[in-house]
Amino acid sequence: MKTFNVYKHPTHGIEAVKVGFSWPAFFFGIIWMLVKKLWGLAGACFVAYIVLSLIEKVTDQSGEGGAQALVYLILAAGYFTLWLVPAFKGNKWREENLSKRGYEQLTTVQAETPDAAVAQAAKPA
């Protein structure tokens, strides 16, 4: 069983957000952010990827041994961070975004899937 925080909006319905690590964010990153309407974060990650790519391109052309190796190490850490941070923080970002968009947290439930969490939260007490 997974833990879900369930949110409700007066006109947009109910959404369930899993607590903890986000496998979809891990595998799909920016695409996942766009699907979940995290526009600003998706844009920031896209810009960060562009900046890292430009740095990599400039470094490729400079051809300086030791300094180039250090820059590649820093670039690898940057790409790795851009890959992992959404997986660990994505669901929290999503909850904050839902709150900003007018959703209110209803409850926290244990369920197998987000749909099951929504159904469980929607049942009358």
Image (tube, rainbow, N blue to C red):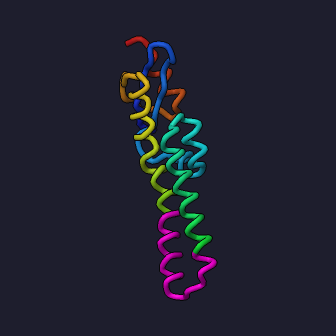
The N terminus appears in which quarter of the rendering? top left
- In this rendering, would 62 be left or right of 119? right
**Which sits in the foreground, 11 or 123?**
11
Q: Quadrant of residue 97?
A: top left
- In this rendering, would 34 be left or right of 123? right
Report x, y in % for residue 16: 47, 29
| In magenta stretch: residue 23 | no
Residue drawn at (41%, 22%) of the image: 102
Residue drawn at (48%, 80%) of the image: 70
The C terminus appears in which quarter of the rendering? top left
The magenta stretch is 59-79
89 in relation to 84, above or below: above
| In magenta stretch: residue 68 | yes
Residue drawn at (50%, 76%) of the image: 71
Report x, y in % for residue 21: 45, 48
103 in relation to 41, above or below: above
Q: Quadrant of residue 34?
A: top right
